[in-house]
């Protein structure tokens, strides 16, 4: 949907932006060819003053049909309409968009396509058919969530579209209490329709107060859409039963953007965003008629899944496994939608639990205006996967590396940890006996002109550094250094105790250090702990995995990961080519001159 905070302010036409610096431009050009996670490496679907929700269905002949919402101006302004485009080469090139509703007509928004079993494509969208533009005599800042729920269909792969039809959206308590007392309904949908049994279900959000308050989840189910060709004979149900949609009063007013998926046991899972800093989930085991009281979505380890006020999406893939798109921090705003993360899902006791996540897309542009991206769709064809996304003025599609997905799904399978022909071993791996010494020899890293070793170069566009260790600190007094590679001028990295039972990584050149730590309270002196620091040059992010869990900030901080400056440059050492450690507290140590995936780190810690 939108970055709604802008809707409560004066909406301005987008100003031209000079994003960051010459470094950003050069970095984008160089990295685009080497890291598929970089946003700018994707293929453009369409760009305009505004474009949103690029959702794709694969037609029977293999062609991709993408529907979206667009306009020449900002979101919510005149000319907003829904359109479709096609690609016959898996997203590398796209046809000129065909309007599904004209730009000159009433606002038409939030198109969601569905492919029937006989090849017809339906598209569902919000349509301001009565052209409601005022509330109590005052002009509305936007009117694209008001009106009728409509649909059209195409029998020629999106080249032409039928006449408009309306869904029978019944009035409920949410509508009757809104600003128009039900004479106008406020709603939108991001929940791309899915097949449920032999029928189809889509999720959407009703709003009880203009513009974005008192949200709750609803669903349309059509039992005969895959068999009936006469649109007037389709059988529609609006679910759940009764007067109230899916929501939990404890989660506050912001409960919106409901994404639904059918589960293997016949149940339904709905995931949506809140303003609490966490994802909410609800389940139905009777076809959507009744839903459980929403609670926080959870990882397999029991921790709640963090997400700001940003669109989450859940998918069930052809292999029966699940994927979740979200943003992995507990903000309560529309900001920080960069990077995007994927987690894999597993059914446990009638619910879906989530793996430790991986970064799937990032942008070197971190600005609020153009550096955020969201509203994805997942495309699966011939065993390969793609993700769409939009930053609101350009929609693009990106290939997802199979290795990333296999790693995520493999976290649930203890047999996943198998040697890969492309997996290089650690640059430095120290046998247990060697850790009895306070000084360890350095080897396996490239040398600099002074004869020392370069552990890491932050200016490079890819690569990075991984430090994998098992530690058992004797105490957590501040600034006890467990590992130190610094030279006489202070360049190198070191790990020390800090905060509340935390370990902190310091990456230093001769002038400054970039730091990040484990989450507060995770470590103790009772037992050894597996700790893996991952320094990823592509998105310039430091991650930490502790005892099989990716740090997410816990209850103490919004983020469990941190950006760092690429201008840190080289991290190197000349100090007699050695590492200092605290022998009795360092139980194992491996250092890699590459980025380890989160899944690799989890698996390594699992088998240790």
Image: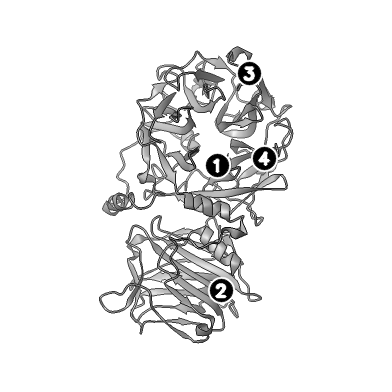
Mark 1, Cα crowd under 10 Å, few <14 / some 14-19 / many 20+, is many
View extreme (front): residue = 421
Q: Is residue 499 among the parts visible in the rendering? A: no
In this figure, which residue is indicated by the disc labeled 3? 168
Checking the image for residue 312, the label placed there is: 1
- Mark 4 residue element: loop
Q: Residue 148: x and y, percent?
A: 56, 19
Looking at the image, is mark 3 or mark 1 earlier in the sequence? 3
Q: Nearer the viewer, residue 514 or 238?
A: 238
Q: Is residue 367 left or right of residue 221?
A: left
Checking the image for residue 470, the label placed there is: 2
Q: Residue 203: x and y, percent?
A: 60, 31
Looking at the image, is mark 2 or mark 3 earlier in the sequence? 3
In the figure, 52 relative to 545: above or below?
Answer: above
Q: Residue 58: x and y, percent?
A: 48, 31
* Location of residue 236 (image quadrant): top right
**Distance from Cα at disc 2 to Cα at disc 3:** 60 Å
In this figure, which residue is indicated by the disc labeled 4? 264
Q: Which of 15 and 600 is in front in this view?
A: 600
Verify CB contact (< 8 Å) between mark 3 and mark 1: no
Image depth: mark 2 or mark 4 in front = 4
Looking at the image, is mark 2 or mark 1 earlier in the sequence? 1
* Location of residue 87 (image quadrant): top left
Q: Residue at x 32, y 66 (%)?
A: 569
- Mark 2 residue element: strand
* Quarter occupied by the C terminus: bottom right
Q: Is residue 219 left or right of residue 599?
A: right
**Distance from Cα at disc 4 to Cα at disc 3:** 29 Å
């Amino acid at each position: 949907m939108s970055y709604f905070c802008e809707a409560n302010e004066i909406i301005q036409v987008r100003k031209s932006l000079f994003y960051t610096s010459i470094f950003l431009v050069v970095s984008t050009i160089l990295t685009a060819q080497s890291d598929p996670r970089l946003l700018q490496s994707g293929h453009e679907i369409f760009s305009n003053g505004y474009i949103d929700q690029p959702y794709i269905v694969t037609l029977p002949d293999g062609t991709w049909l993408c529907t979206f919402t667009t306009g020449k101006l900002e979101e919510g302004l005149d000319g907003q309409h829904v359109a479709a485009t096609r690609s016959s080469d898996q997203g590398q090139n796209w046809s000129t968009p065909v309007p599904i509703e004209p730009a000159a007509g009433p606002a038409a928004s939030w198109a969601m396509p569905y492919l029937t079993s006989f090849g017809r494509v339906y598209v569902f969208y919000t349509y301001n058919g009565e052209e409601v533009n005022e509330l109590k005599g005052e002009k509305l800042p936007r009117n694209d969530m008001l009106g009728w729920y409509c649909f059209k269909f195409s029998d020629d792969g999106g080249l032409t579209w039928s006449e408009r039809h309306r869904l029978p959206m019944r009035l409920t308590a949410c509508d009757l209490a809104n600003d128009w007392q039900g004479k106008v309904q406020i709603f939108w949908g991001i929940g791309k329709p899915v097949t449920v049994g032999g029928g189809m279900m889509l999720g959407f959000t009703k709003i009880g107060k203009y513009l974005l308050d008192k949200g709750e989840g609803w669903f349309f189910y059509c039992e005969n859409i895959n068999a009936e060709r006469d649109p007037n004979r389709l059988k529609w149900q609006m679910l759940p039963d009764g007067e109230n949609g899916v929501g939990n009063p404890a989660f506050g007013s912001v409960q919106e953007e409901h994404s639904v998926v059918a589960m293997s046991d016949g149940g339904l899972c709905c995931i949506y965003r809140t303003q609490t800093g966490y994802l909410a989930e609800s389940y139905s085991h009777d076809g959507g008629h009744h839903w459980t009281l929403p609670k926080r979505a959870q990882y397999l380890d029991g921790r709640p899944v963090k997400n700001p006020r940003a669109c989450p999406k859940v998918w069930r893939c052809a292999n029966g496994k699940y994927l979740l798109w979200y943003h992995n921090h507990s903000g309560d705003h529309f900001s920080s939608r960069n990077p995007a993360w994927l987690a894999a899902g597993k059914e446990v006791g009638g619910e879906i639990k989530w793996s430790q996540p991986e970064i799937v897309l990032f942008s070197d542009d971190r600005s609020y205006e153009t550096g955020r991206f969201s509203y994805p769709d997942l495309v699966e064809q011939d065993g390969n996967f793609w993700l769409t996304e939009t930053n609101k003025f350009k929609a693009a599609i990106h290939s997802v590396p199979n290795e990333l997905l296999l790693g995520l799904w493999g976290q649930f399978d203890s047999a996943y940890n198998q040697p890969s022909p492309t997996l290089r071993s650690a640059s430095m791996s120290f046998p247990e006996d060697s850790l009895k010494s306070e000084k360890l020899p350095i080897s396996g890293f490239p040398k600099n002109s002074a004869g020392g070793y370069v552990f890491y170069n932050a200016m490079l566009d890819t690569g990075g550094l991984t430090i994998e260790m098992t530690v058992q600190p004797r105490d957590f007094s501040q600034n006890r250094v467990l590992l130190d590679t610094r030279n006489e001028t202070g360049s190198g990295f070191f790990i020390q105790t800090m905060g509340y039972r935390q370990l902190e990584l310091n990456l230093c050149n001769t002038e400054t250090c970039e730091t990040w730590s484990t989450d507060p309270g995770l470590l103790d002196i009772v037992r050894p702990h597996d700790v893996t620091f991952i320094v990823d040059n592509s998105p310039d992010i430091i991650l930490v995995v502790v005892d099989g869990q990716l740090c997410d900030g816990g209850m103490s901080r919004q983020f469990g990961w941190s950006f760092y400056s690429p201008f840190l440059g080289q991290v190197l050492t000349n100090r007699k080519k050695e590492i200092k450690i605290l022998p009795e507290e360092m139980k194992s140590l491996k250092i890699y001159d590459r980025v380890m995936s989160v899944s690799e780190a989890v698996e390594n810690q699992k088998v240790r």
